[in-house]
Amino acid sequence: MTASSRSLVVFRAVAFAAAAGGAVCLVWAARAVPAGLRTIERKQADLAAIEAQDAKVRGFDPYFTALAAVTGAPPEAPAEMLRRVAPGAPAPVMAGGGVEPIEGPWSLHRVEMTFADVPIDSVAAFLAECEGARPRWRASNLRIQALDPGGTRARVSMGLEGIVRAAAKGRAP
């Protein structure tokens, strides 16, 4: 065997080994494709769900715009409304329930109020005033416990929620 034929055999062996190695790598990579496709499909489904949620949230934009047009000022604080509606009622114990950001500049304010001894008709007038306020305060929970049977005074615990424009300065709920 001559030197040139030996180098040709070595070259063919190296080329065959490279081709075999490439084929093995191709088969190994092809096995991973289905798992990668499943991951891509799962991420596409997640993205579609996020896009649907975004479209739903954007559907509320006209309502927030209308609310902003109607309510230029922050809502009146519940304690101020109570003093106006029932001047003789004792001051409630108030606890801030927290602030939750909503879409855009809006936030949801929660307030917990507890009255130790209050006339029941004052509570009804206060709730009517909360409902009529702009933006309105909504009673999220209400518990009335009569102090004596047939009496007109009660112990009241209530939670109020109101939507407030975060950029507005003034009375905090």
Image (cartoon, rainbow, N blue to C red):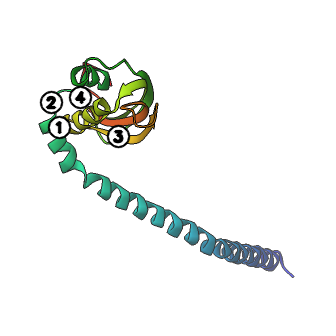
Distance between mark 3 and mark 2 Cα atoms: 22 Å
Residues tagged 2 and 1 counted as in contact (Cβ below 8 A): yes
Q: Circle 3 — which element?
A: strand
Q: Position of residue 15 (x, y in %)?
A: 72, 75
Which element is circle 2 on? Answer: loop
Q: CA distance from mark 2 to mark 1?
A: 6 Å
Q: Check disc 1 and report the residue beneath it.
A: 68
Q: Amino acid at mark 3?
A: Ala
The span from disc 3 to disc 1 (Cα, nearest Å) is 21 Å
Q: With 19 as the anchor, is 57 left or right in this view?
A: left
Give the residue at the far bottom of this rendering. Answer: 1
Q: What's the distance in space between the residues labelled 4 and 3, CA to CA?
A: 15 Å
Q: Please rate how many residues cluster around mark 4, counting C-alpha atoms within 10 Å: few if below 14, some from 14 to 19, many from 20.
A: many
Kindly identify which residue carries mark 4.
75
Between 44 and 93, the one nearer to me in the picture: 93
Amino acid type at image mark 2: Gly
Q: Would residue 9 appear left or right of 102 to someone viewing this image?
A: right
Mark sitting earlier along the chain (1/4): 1
Give residue 111's mark: none
Q: Considering the numbered disc 4 on the image, is that residue within a helix, a strand or a loop?
A: loop
Please name the amino acid that badge 1 sits on. Ala
Q: Which residue is mark 3?
A: 139
Res 120 seen here: yes
Residue 106 in sight from this viewpoint: no
Circle 2 is placed at which residue position? 72
Disc with the residue nearer the chain's start (3 vs 2):
2
Mark 1 to mark 4 CA distance (whole Å): 12 Å
Residue at 31% over, 57% down: 56
Residue 11 vs residue 29: left or right? right
Q: Residues within 10 Å of mark 2 (few under 14, many from 20)?
A: few
